[in-house]
Amino acid sequence: MALDFDDAERRAVYKAIATRRDVRVFLPDPVPAAVVRRILEAGHQGPSVGYMQPWNFIAIRDRQVLERIAEAVERERVRAGEKFPDERRDYYLRLKVEGLREAPWTICVTNDSTRGGPVVLGRNTIPETDLMSTACAIENMWLAARAEGIGMGWVSMYEKDDVRAILGIPAHVDPVALLSLGYTPHFADEPILQRVGWRERIDIGQIIFLDGWARTWKEELK
């Protein structure tokens, strides 16, 4: 067996996973471009079906561009809030998306479903594996940012065509994520939506099955 992680390295990986947070509060301190580059390289090392690598990363630090994106997000944030019942609408409308204005960087992650051509190895029956692959790249970036002590917040309240127009993204490419990136005063002990009672983390015993659907995995299984 290849055991090329020692105990400390293995604990560090699990620590990054367990303490990753969707950050909403950022400090104005600049993040060096070299650090941002490392985080993007971590994303580019993500797994992809058929090695299609369907992602692109647009690193944005121009404040005028970020302000235009923030305005587009704010319109959709208010519009989306109307869909929630009253008791949740008030909290939803208090959610901060100011990271677009506060964080020194925002990364727009795109997904190009045409990359690799019309036939991609392993994608014949599940076409959405391109988007799954891009999600893996985003998670890599999130974990790398956490290891660097940098907060990342995912903003998803926008119309894709608005972001395409602002950033000049081709029509066939989807802007699937806006990730605010910057130093933060603290990383919360638990996810913010769990802390405020929006939802609890599902007990793992309810979602792990063995050898078939709804067949309980016994903790004592060896």
Image (tube, grey):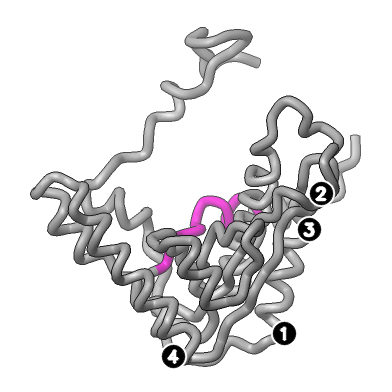
Q: Look at label 1 and name its amino acid.
A: Ala
**In which image quadrant can residue 211 be found?**
top right
Q: Decide which of tag 1 and tag 4 comes sooner along the chain.
A: 4
Front-lying residue, 148 or 78: 78
Q: Look at label 4 and name its amino acid.
A: Pro
Mark 4 or mark 2, whichever is nearer to me: 2
Marks 1 and 4, Cα distance to the nearest angstrom?
17 Å
Q: Look at label 2 and name its amino acid.
A: Met
| Residue found at the far right of this picture | 1
Label annotation for residue 34: 1
| Residue found at the far front of this picture | 171
180 vs 49, left or right, is left
Taking the magenta stretch, the answer to whether it contains residue 16 is yes
Q: Mark 3 points at which residue?
A: 45
Circle 1/circle 4 CB separation < 8 Å:
no
Marks 1 and 2, Cα distance to the nearest angstrom?
26 Å
